Structures are given as structure tokens and as C-alpha cells.
Amino acid sequence: MSPNIKRSIFLFAAVFVFALPLNAHAYIGPGAGFALISSFLTLMIAFFTASFALLTFPVRVVIRSMKRRRSLGRSKVKKVIILGLDGLEPTITERMMENGELPNLKKLRDSGSYRHLGTSTPALSPVAWSTFATGADSSRHAIWDFLSRDRRSYLPKLSSSEVYGSQRFMRIGPFRIPRGKGGVRGLRKGKTFWKILSENGVFNSVLRVPITFPVEKINGVMVAGMCVPDLRGSQGSFTYFTTNNDEAERIGGLIISIEERAGRVDTRIPGPQNPLGGGALTVPLAATIDRDSGRVELTVGEETHTVVEREYTPWVKLKFKAAPGITMHGIVRFYVTSMNGTFGLYMTPIHIDPEKPAMPISYPNFFSIYLSKLMGSHATLGLAEDTWAMNEGVLDEKGWLDQAYGFHEERKTMWFHSLDRLRDGMAVCVFDITDRLQHMFFRYLDDDHPANRGKPESAYKDAVYDMYRQMDVLVGDTAKHVDDKTAFFVMSDHGFKNFRRGINLNTWLVENGFMTLKDGAGPGEYLESVDWERTQAYAIGLGNIYINVKGRERLGIVDPADVAQVKRRVAQALGGLCDVDGSLAVRRVIDVQDTFKGPYTKDGPELIPGFAVGYRDSWDCAKGVISPTVFEDNVKPWSGDHCMDPEIVPGVLFSNLDIKAESPNLMDLGPTVLDLFGVDIPNFMVGKNIL
């Protein structure tokens, strides 16, 4: 019997779903989970599907060609290029343009047009990019935050995607074989404008746009962005190996104590849970430390790499073998943090290997494999830049910047490869470094920021401005692909402001009588201290407030007829909230049911606080911890943010075309692109054509 047949028989009826709970990290909450789908039934379905696709290929080509000709006949342009620079801030952009530091953006503004771009409510990246993609607000695409809440358990869960799997298993020896189908589904509602373009025969290249996981079938290619999990099933958990036995637990990662003997360390890398049972899968890791030469030799499986302190290895492949014929493939990079005295070794989250993807991270599925052959291994994790490793002091500023710019160069390679091959249709790519770097270095724009106190001046204090200059170069290089038949847009989903002080909304709810804690309960995590039978309101995610409604939440106490009254009381008390020094902390409180009218309004929170500049939901509140005080200094490197009143954090919009709208909004981009290609704007889109 051939090895392939043996493998097929072994995979009979196997759909493997496994998840690793995630410690609180970057966008705090449990991991998305991870699904690996492979079975004999799947193979059979794939065979017949492929056969049907082959037989119908000529017909589909003719139909697609007819649609394409009809669309191009009505089109005002041949190509649309959208360059997304996540979080680019208008005030910084404008000041640097006037100082002559951003010549390409200035040229685009002067020869075309420039506007502030209204962001989503709330002004969170998954909400904003979903609004961009669908041309509609949260009440129509159903994404209100990074996290939503489970009405039964009151625990947070990822809002954008959901892993599901079989609840029935059969045992074969030591293995647990699922007896049903599993997978992952996207939770964003509405239809994206690139899907509508595809249905009208227009080609699309959609690269790393947030909230595109799981990928959708389009006429073109797609690489998924934010919310692609790592191989452990989290949204990104690093690993830190250290000989310092006193190393404290760190948020967002695993700390593994190691022992050095005669200059050698032997340990194992923890990976995903074995889908067949038996705990986490591991691979061996050895480090030979030569302090005289300042070099470390790392051996992972069959690969060996020599590195020096504070330098990264290239991508290293990891193979986690669950059983004969079943291997999960990941990639990581290592960074030696210290060699003098204690030895420290940082490992990135385990990215899904794009060359052997265990999940559909691109469309077509082989597209990530093609890119790997073209450019080598590259980051696939949705939140690739490891902000929590730096927040927790595992990565230094140099290590974080080297990592972030490394990912940025990979993204550029993908982007320009796409543009070089774009003959007609749309290309859109979102670059994340603009958002992540401002999160981590915005404190250097404020000498008095709490995170700077007692610390020497950093060599990277100009990192934000340096990044803006780099983005201007990116704009100039992209503009080289623009001709007189191309519509070119440069945009950001929101702006950025200082984040100096955190507000624990749940502590505020306790102090104002809307929440009650269990007798004798401590601060807890994920609201475990809350006495739900005496609680009227609670906050989950990055600032959203829910009413504990009877008949909706499992332990709800507020009668549906009284919800409006409770909302009004919370909003009146919270609106205009001031800090202990009298500074305004909450500008207003948005009543969701009064503001939104779409079909998914009922799935959202009841209230959204509009924080003032300098304020945001506190770290403790995001983890569901009831801290002793409402206000606290933000002393973490993560010092810039946009989780504030949407009115004060607009994005930017540049175009080579004349933008007629004085106050364009994120939801207007999709309808505008549809009109440029001569495609009718569907009724469910709220946005308008800004041209």
C-alpha cells in the first residue's frame, strides 16, 4: 500500500480542532482558537469539486469574460489602487507636509485632493476596516469591538471569527478522532465591495486588509490580515526562554525557565495542542553559547543558525508531528536578548507556515504557497508585530523595531509584486507598521508622558517621525504605478492621540452602584468577581458597556422595559466624567440604539463612551479586573491610541482625483470604487460616492 493511501485511510473522518486559551495580550481576550481540517471525506469532496470545476471551466471563463467586458464598458477608470496606512494621524501628517518632510504626500495633495476621513464608531481597527470593506456601519456588519461577549458565561470572545468542531469523538488506540466536521467561520456580516466587484467580473488583489480571515472567494487573490491566529490558536503569544529563574510571568507570552550546562541549553518549544489528545506538541531546541566569540548556535530540528546578541535569525521552520502523516507546520524567528550573566532567548509567536498552511490564509489557497516560493517565508499572523513582548520588557526597542520593519519589507514585496502584475481591476493593501509603531512610541511625542518618567532619553525618540518619512517613500513608490487611467487613494482608518491615563469602567460602575461584587471577592479577571444577580451594567472589550438584561444574559436582572432608564442613568453619570485633577476624561456617551438603525444593532453594546484625548479604557478593565481606583497612569510603552471619541481621531484621505465631499467617511470608499468601475451601489451600503 502506498504512503499516500495509508495517509488517506488514517485521515478517515478526521477533522481536527484545537484551541489554546490566550493570556491577555495586545488586544486582550481569549484566543480565536485554531482549526485544522483534513479527512477522507474532505478529500473525496475536493476530488469531485475539482472535477466539476475542470468540466465547467470553459463555461465559467465565458461568463466571467462577458461580465468583465460589461463592467469595463461602464468603467470610468482602468485601475483603482488603494494604499492603506493604518492609523496615520492628520495633525502629524499635515505638520510634516508643511515642513517639507513628506514630499510625495504633499505632491498628491496639491495635484489631487486631501481630506480628513471620518472613522467608525467605535474607532477600533476591526470596526473601522469592516466599515471600509462593507460600506456600512457596525449595525450592518455586526463588528463592534475586537471582542464580543458570551451572554451565557459573560466571558469575552473574538468578534471576527469563530472556530467550531465536532463534539463527538471515537478512540483508536491513544488517539481521539473527531466524528464530525469542523472549521472556522467569519462573523462579519454584509458583503465586501471587492466581492461585489468580483461578481461583476472585476479582478481584485486584496492584501492584508484587517478582518479578512477566514478568506473569501473572489475574482483575484487575497492574503488575510488581522485576526489570523498563530499555530497555538491565540492572536499571538511569544515564548521567552531564560536562565533567570526569578523571571515573573508576562502578559501575552510563555516564560520558560531553562538551565545552562557547560555553555549549552537543551529545552523544547511548546506548540499547538495535539488534536488527537495528549497535551501540547513540542519540538526540541538546543542553544550552544560561546561568550568569547559572542555567538550562539541554535539548533531546531534539522536546522542550525548562528546568531549574535540582539539580532534575529531568519524564519525557522517548526514541524509539530501529531501522528504518522499528520504534521502541523509553523515558522518563527529567534532573538538573543542577553548573553552576559543570564541567557535570554525570545521567540516570536508561531506563525502558520505560508508554504504549508494548515488553514486557508490566502485565496486561492495555493497563493500563500506561491508567495513563499517567490519571496521565502513571511509573517502570516494577523497581529504580527509583537507589541506585548515589548510592553512586558522581553523585547527592547531595537528588537521590536527590527521585527516590525522586517515585516514591513515583506509586505512591500507582496504589494509591489501585485502592482507590477495589475493590468486592470483593483489592488488594495494595508500596512500595519503605522498603527503598531505609534502605539509603542507615541510617548516620545510627549516629554511628560507617565511612561517616560525616570527613564533616560531613548535613541529611538524620533521613531514616529522616521516612520512617517518611510511611509512617504512608500507612497512615492506606489505612485509610480499610477497613470491617467488609474484612481489612486491613500487612506488611514483612524488617527492617533496620546494615551496617558486609563479608566476602569467596571470600577466606575461599582462605585456608582451599577455593578456589585461578590462578598469578599478580589479584583479577579474576566469579571469573575462580579455578582451578576446584583449587577445592572458591565464593560467588556475596549470600552463598550452592556446592560445586564433579563432574558438575554443568563443572569440578567434588568427588565427589558427598564433598559432605557438604566442606560440614561449610566450615560448621565458617565458623560462629562473628570479625572482627579479636573481634566475632562469622557466627552460624551453614545447610545447605540438611538444612533444606529441596522439589523445588528441588537448585537452591539448599549453604550459607547467617547473618551477625551489622553484617556482610554484601562489595561485592567480590558482584562476584566476590578481595580481599586477608576483612574491610573499608563506607564507601558503602548502609549498612543485611538480608542477615543471618533470625532477626535479621524483618518486621512489623499487621492489623485477631485474629492467633492467635504467630510468623507470610511464607509464611502467602497461605494466610490464601485461607481468608478460602473457597478451599481447596493442598497445595504450606507456610504456615498465622494467624487
Image (spheres, rainbow, N blue to C red):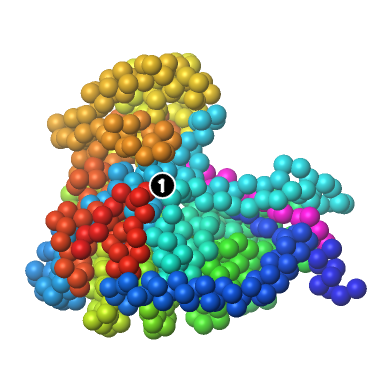
Residue placed at 52% from the left, 44% from the top?
30
Closer to the camera, 604 or 286? 604
Whether residue 144 is visible: yes
Q: Is residue 466 left or right of residue 91?
A: right
Q: Is residue 206 magenta?
A: no
Name the image quarter holding the N terminus.
bottom right
x then y, percent, for residue 528: 50, 28
Q: Is residue 570 left or right of residue 371?
A: left
x then y, percent, for residue 83: 31, 69
Quadrant of residue 606 within the rendered picture: top left
**Which stretch is magenta?**
10-32
Closer to the camera, 236 or 153? 153
Residue 488 vertical position relative to residue 94 in the rendered view, above or below: below
Name the image quarter holding the C terminus.
bottom left
Residue placed at 78% from the left, 61% from the top?
40
The tally of labels here is 1
The amino acid marked with disc number 1 is His
Quadrant of residue 395 within the rendered picture: bottom left
Q: Main secondary structure of the magenta part?
A: loop
**Pointer 1: what residue?**
141
x then y, percent, for residue 129: 36, 55
Quadrant of residue 584 within the rendered picture: top left
Closer to the camera, 257 or 31? 31
Residue 314 vertical position relative to residue 19 in the rendered view, above or below: below
Q: Residue furthest right?
A: 1
Disc 1 crowd, CA 10 A, few/some/many (<14, 14-19, 20+): many
Residue placed at 36% from the left, 75% from the top?
72
Closer to the camera, 385 or 70? 70
Q: Residue furthest left?
A: 98
Whether residue 294 is visible: no
Residue placed at 9% from the left, 69% from the top?
98
Q: Is residue 618 left or right of residue 18?
A: left
